[in-house]
Image (cartoon, grey):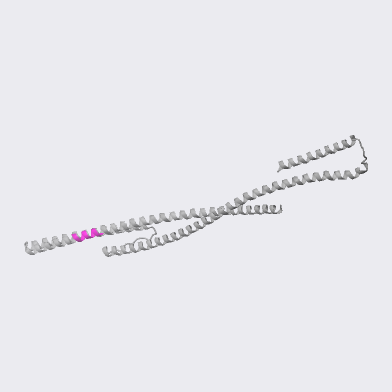
Amino acid sequence: LNDRLATYLEKVRTLEATNKDLEDKLKNFHTSKVVTRDYTSSEDQLQPLRDQIIAAIIENSRVALEIDNAKLAADDFRTKYESEYTIRQSVEADILNLKGLKKECEINHTSNLQEIETLKQEIEELKKQHEEDMGGLKEEMAGTVNVNVQASESPDLARILEDLRADYESIVQRNKQDLERWFNKQVEAKEAEAIQKAEAAGGTETTKTEMTDLRRQTQSLQAELDALRATKASLEENLAGVDGRYQMELHRIAALVASLEEELMNIRDSMTSQNEEYKKLLNIKEQLELEIATYRKLLEGE
């Protein structure tokens, strides 16, 4: 525009110089020409007409320059309007995509919350089932060895199981020792009684029968001891299985909860970032709408 303006100003100056040159030539022509007729009386009327012609030429040049400048400005505004309109369409498309993405994130967020609630319920059910299993195990142990296990209450399942195992092993070991001592005492007593009876009866048939009964009682006690040992081993194996199963389940649930919490934090961060970007795009859209409205007013005014 500046170059065009400079060109038109140069053209105006050229026209003015040309007009002045023509006036000088006209004056020289009139002065050098042999006057055959006297126009002195009409000179006063011709001079205003000359001035009007020169003013009209200058005005026409100025108007033509303004028209060209207005056309150039209109072309620039039209180009800028088309560019801004394209940008606006792109921004609106991005906003629609962001709205869809936001809706999808909200759906995922709701689904994750529901899954977390489900996992919490599963944890509560596992805790309840564990308490029931431990209660049943305690009752079974109490019915088998006739003892009550005292365990300190603690929310740590591993420590509870470890304390329970230690108490149970201590009780079983103590009962085993008591049973062996009682068995040995019974055997010694029976043997002593048999010896006394054998010495008193002189090795009669009765002594043989008592010895046979003593052996049978010894075998019965040995079988009972073996059964108690097998029960102890079975209970220890069951306890180890329960401990391992619940430890694995707790680790799995803890890992899953940690993963879901991390995913939830990522979703929240993503939604925060998307909201900020959405606000920025809205601000850009508003600015573009204001500029487009301004261009439209300028075009309508033209």
Stretch in magenta: 222-231
Q: Is residue 229 left or right of residue 245?
A: left
- The residue positioned 49% from the left and 57% from the top of the image is 104
- The residue positioned 34% from the left and 64% from the top of the image is 132
Picture coordinates of residue 211, whole percent (x, y): 11, 61
Rendered view: 298 above or below 182:
above
Q: 279 and 212: which one is in front?
A: 279
Q: Quadrant of residue 12?
A: top right
- Residue that sits furthest to the front in the current view: 36
Q: 62 and 156: which one is in front?
A: 62
Q: 296 and 36: which one is in front?
A: 36
Magenta stretch: includes residue 73: no
Q: Is residue 271 left or right of residue 230?
A: right
Q: Is residue 222 left or right of residue 150?
A: left
Q: Quadrant of residue 42?
A: top right
Rendered view: 35 above or below 259:
above
- The residue positioned 69% from the left and 49% from the top of the image is 74
Picture coordinates of residue 280, whole percent (x, y): 59, 52
Rendered view: 132 above or below 89:
below
Q: Quadrant of residue 1?
A: top right
Q: Is residue 42 visible?
A: yes
Q: How many numbered badges does the structure rendering display? A: 0
Q: Is residue 275 left or right of residue 191?
A: right
Picture coordinates of residue 24, whole percent (x, y): 85, 37
Magenta stretch: dominant SS?
Answer: helix
Q: Is residue 158 visible?
A: no
